[in-house]
Amino acid sequence: MESFSEALRQPVVDFAILLAVILTMPPLFERLKLPGLLGLLVAGVLLGSSGLNLLNSNSETMKLLSDIGKIYLMFVAGLEIDLEQFRRTKNRSLGFGFTTFAIPLTTGTIVGRLFGMDWNASVLIGSLLASHTLLAYPIVRRLGVVNNEAVTVTIGATIFTDIGALLVLAICVGINKGDFSATSLVTLLLSLAIYAAAILFGLDWLGKEFFRRTKNDEGNQFLFVLLALFLTSVGAQLIGVEQIVGAFLAGLAVNDVVGNGPVKEKVEFVGSVLFIPIFFVNMGLLLDLQAFIRTLETIGLTLFIIGGLIGSKFLAAFLVKGLYRYSWRQTLTMWSLSLPQVAATLAAAVVGFQENIIGESVLNSVILMMLITAVLGPLITSRTAAKLVPETIDKVYAVTEFNSSKTDSSVIVERNTSKTVALQTSQGGEINSPPVSLDSDTAEGVYPLNLEQFSVVVPVSNPQTERYLIEMATLVARHEGGRIVPLAIAPAQARMDSLQMDLAISRSQELLVQAKDLSRKLGVEAKPILRIDFDIAAGISHAAREENANIIVLGMSDRLGFRARLFGNLTDSVLWSAHCLVLVARLLDSPLSIKRILVPVENLTASAIRPIRFAQILAETNQAEITLIHVCNPRTEQKRISALRSQLLSLFTDFTSQLSVKVQIVPADNIIAEILKAARGQDLVVLRSQRRRIGADGLAMGEISTPLLKQLSCSVVLFGEPHNTLNRLN
C-alpha cells in the first residue's frame, strides 16, 4: 500500500493527469459554448489545493512545465504577429499602439493608487491593461476585412503594446528586487536595447542561413526554433529581465524565417496541445478559490480594473478615430480587437504575482478580466466587423498577346486603385487587358510572366487512382491548350544497382506508359518523366519547377490525424514547397461524370476566386451545375448580403458558355454544418487549402477544411495556393 502511494507521487502521474485534463476539459466547455481556456482554469482549481489536491503548483514538474508554457505562450504571440501588415501601416500602427498602450497604462496606475497600492504595483497593473491579444483575428479574416486599414493598424499595434508592457514588467521586477536607481534603470534599458537588436537582427540572419543550408530538413529546423526560444529566454534572464521578454523577441525574430510553413505549424502545434494548456492549468492551481470568492465579495477592485480596461481601450480607439478619420464601425472594430487580454497579460500577471509585486486580489481580478474580455471582444468584433467594407483589391493587368520577347515580358502591379490603366511591357509597349484581383499582401512592382506552354504535373504512384487524376489533369490542360506531365518518383536506394531500385524503376515505367496511353485517348499531349529521389515530396516539387508547371494535380493523403499534424505528410510537404497551384484530389468517381459542383466561398480575394474559375472549367466540359455557398455572420445586414450575391453572380457574366449557377448566402454560426448540408447530393466540393492558425493564446482556432475532409462523402478537390500569387489559372 505504501508503494502504491509512492507511485502516485511520481512526476509521471502528474503528467498523465495534465494530459487527461487537456484532452477532455476544453472540448467539454466548448460544447457548453464557453471558452476552452475556462475549462483549463476550472480543472486547475478542482485539482489544486482548493479542490482534490492532486496537483501542486510548487512541485518541480509543474514549475518546469508551466514555465515552458509561459515562455511558449509569449513566443507564439510574437510568431503570430503579421510583420508584413505592420510594415505597410507602421506609422499609424505606432500611433494607435501608443494611445492604446499609454491610456490603459495611466488608467491602471490610477486604479492601483486609488486602492492603496504602491507605485510599483500600480504601474504593473497599468501595464497589464496596456497590451492586447488578437483573439478575434479569425473572425475578421473570415469576414474578408483583414485588409481594411483599421484592422491592419490594430494588428500592427500589437507589437508596440506587447513590447511596451513587457518593458514595464522588466522595470517593475527590477525595482522590486531592490537597489534600483536611475543608473541601473539606464543600464537595464541600454542592455535590453542591445539585446533586442541582437535577437531581432542576429537571430533573423542566423535563422535564414540555417534554413537555407538545411533546406527540407524540417526536424532540425524545428529543433533550431526551439533552441532559439530557450536560449533567448535564458539570455533575457542574464541581462536582468524576465524570460517572457526574450521569448517574445525570439518569436518576432524567427517570424520571417519560418513564414507560414510546416515548421511554424509544428512549433505551434506542440505548444497548443501541450505546454500552453499546462500553463493555464497551473494558473488554476495558483488561484485560491476562497480568495477568489472574497475578491468577488469586495468587487470594487475587480470592477475598476475591468471597467478601466474597457473604457481606456475605447478612449484610445476614439482618439485615433479623429486623428485618422476612421468611421464609427472601424473605431468599434479597433476597440473590440484590442479588448481581449490573454497572452502578455496573463504571463506578466503570473510573473508579478510570483515576484510578490501584486497580490491574490489583483491576480484574481486579472483572471476574471481575461475571461470576460475573451468573450466580449470577439462577440463585439463579429458584430462590428461584419459591417465593414473591405479595402480596394489590388489589380494586376495580365498579358495574353504581345510582341515583346518571352524573357523581357512583365506585368505591372498597382496598389489600391480602381481605374483601368494600360499594361506596359519592359520594352515599353502598351496593351490593355482585363484586370485580375491580386491578394493584398503582394508587393507593388514588375513581375515576369510565364509564357511557356501551359503544363500540368501529375504524380502517379497508385494504379487504382491514376486514371482519375490523369482525367482531372487533362480537363484543365485541354481547356488551357496545354499538356500534362505524368511524373513517377522511384524511391532512391543507397546502391543504384540494387534489386529494389530495379523493381522501383520498372514499376514507375509501367505507370508512365499507362498514363501516356490514357492521355492519348483523351486527346492531350503528354510528356512522361521518371525521377529517382530519396524525398518523394521534394522530387515532385523540383520536377514541377524544372518543367515550369502551372499546376500540380496530386492524390490526397489518407493521413489526417495526430501523426500527420505533427510530422506532416506528402501532401503537406508539396503544398508548402511547390511554386505553383496544387490541386489535391480525392476522387470517388471519374471527373468526366461530375454534374454538380459545390464551391464554398469565404471572401472575394484572388485566392478565393481561383477555385470558382476551376469549377467553371469542369462545368463547361461536363455541362455541370455550379453552386456557390457563402456562410456569413447571422447579424450581417441584408444590404451586404445582396451586394455579395451580386458580386458572386457577376463572376460568371463574362463566360461564353451558358452555365447553370446558383448562389447561396447563408447567415449562420456553424460554417461546417451549413457546407455539409449544401454538399448533400453534390458530386464534387472544391475547397481552399488554409494553413492551420494558432491564436496568440496558443489554443487552436478551428479549421474549416480538415473537418470537412473527414465528413464529406463525395469527391473533393483542395486548392493549394502558391506563395507567389501570380501563379494562377489564365
Image (cartoon, helix red, strand yellow):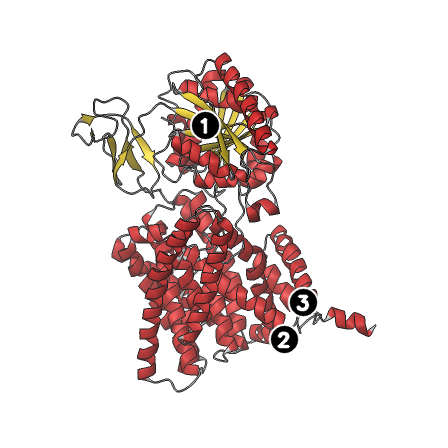
Q: Which mark is residue 46?
A: 3
Dot 2: element: helix
- Residue at 64%, 68% (x, y): give it: 45
Question: Which residue is labeled 2 in the image?
Answer: 290
Tag 3: amino acid:
Leu
Q: Position of residue 362 (x, y in %)?
A: 50, 74
- Identify the mark nearer the N-term, 1 or 2: 2
How many C-alpha atoms fall within 10 Å of the one at disc 1: few (<14), some, or many (≥20)?
many
Quadrant location of the N terminus in the rendered image: bottom right
> Taking the image as drawn, is residue 333 in sight?
no
Tag 1: amino acid:
Val
Dot 3: element: helix
Q: CA distance from mark 3 to mark 2?
A: 13 Å
Q: CA distance from mark 1 to mark 2?
A: 65 Å
Question: Which residue is labeled 1 in the image?
Answer: 457
- Residue at 55%, 55% (x, y): give it: 270
